[in-house]
Image (cartoon, rainbow, N blue to C red):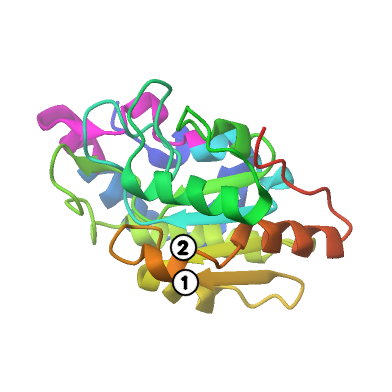
Amino acid sequence: MPLDLMELLPGDWRERLDPLVDPLATAALSAFVEAEYERQTVYPPREDLFNAFRHCPYDRARVLILGQDPYHGPGQAHGLSFSVRDGVRLPPSLRNIYKELAGDLDVPPAASGDLTRWADQGVLLLNAVLTVRAAEAGSHANKGWEDFTDAAIRALNDKTDRVVFVLWGAYARKKARLVTGPQHTVIESAHPSPLSAKKFFGTRPFSAVNKALADAGQPEIDWGA
């Protein structure tokens, strides 16, 4: 049976995205992704593809941290932006995220790079492109994922409760145009990559997220959980 990405989505997210995506474009993307998994080494593993949505149900989503595309090294990507599995060496961007978290909220850097603990609190750790060929960064860009994940951002924008959109780097910051609800908060800065980390350090995004949530009467994220 052909791969159907919409059928793989958790039901709550599928219901929200279905009116926002073009069915023909989604079918073409499904066919491309299926062929890539069959013929190439692709990350994350197929079973982890929609982990961001599984760990962060639509009704509980209150923060978005947007990445670009998955890590392309073996054992790294598992469906959550910036996150790696337990036991995997921390990538440079994640090390810088932890360094900024320590400076911002005095949270000691975690030994593990698995950010599932954030996702389970309502942080949607979404990449704009959800698959990548091994050792080929950006190889699945411009194949249809961007429209699919833009639909997820639009779905979050449709929420009446505040969502905090965290956009790091020029690519992510372009998505600010999708956030039109006055109830929402957009937090923008440089990317935590070593190439731009000097401009990322000191931006204090984690305390800014918690302030925006608290101002809206929502519980703060326990970033050290």
**Image position, residue 104 (x, y; %):** 63, 56
Residue annotated with mark 1:
175
Relative vertical location of residue 39 with respect to residue 102 in this rendering, above or below: above
* Relative to 218, 149 lies left or right: left
Q: What quarter of the picture does the N terminus occupy?
A: top left
Kindly report the distance in space between the C-alpha atoms of the residues bearing marks 2 and 1. 8 Å
Residue annotated with mark 2:
150
The three-letter code of the residue at mark 1 reads Lys
The residue sitting at 63% across, 42% down in the picture is 107
Q: Is residue 43 magenta?
A: yes
The three-letter code of the residue at mark 2 reads Asp
When asked about the image quadrant of residue 43, the answer is top left
| Residue at the far top in the pictured view | 87
| Magenta-drawn segment | 33-51
Crowding at mark 1 (Cα within 10 Å: few <14, some 14-19, many 20+) = some
Q: Nearer the viewer, residue 36 or 88?
A: 88
**Image position, residue 222 (x, y; %):** 72, 41
Q: Nearer the viewer, residue 70 or 99?
A: 99
Q: Is residue 191 magenta?
A: no
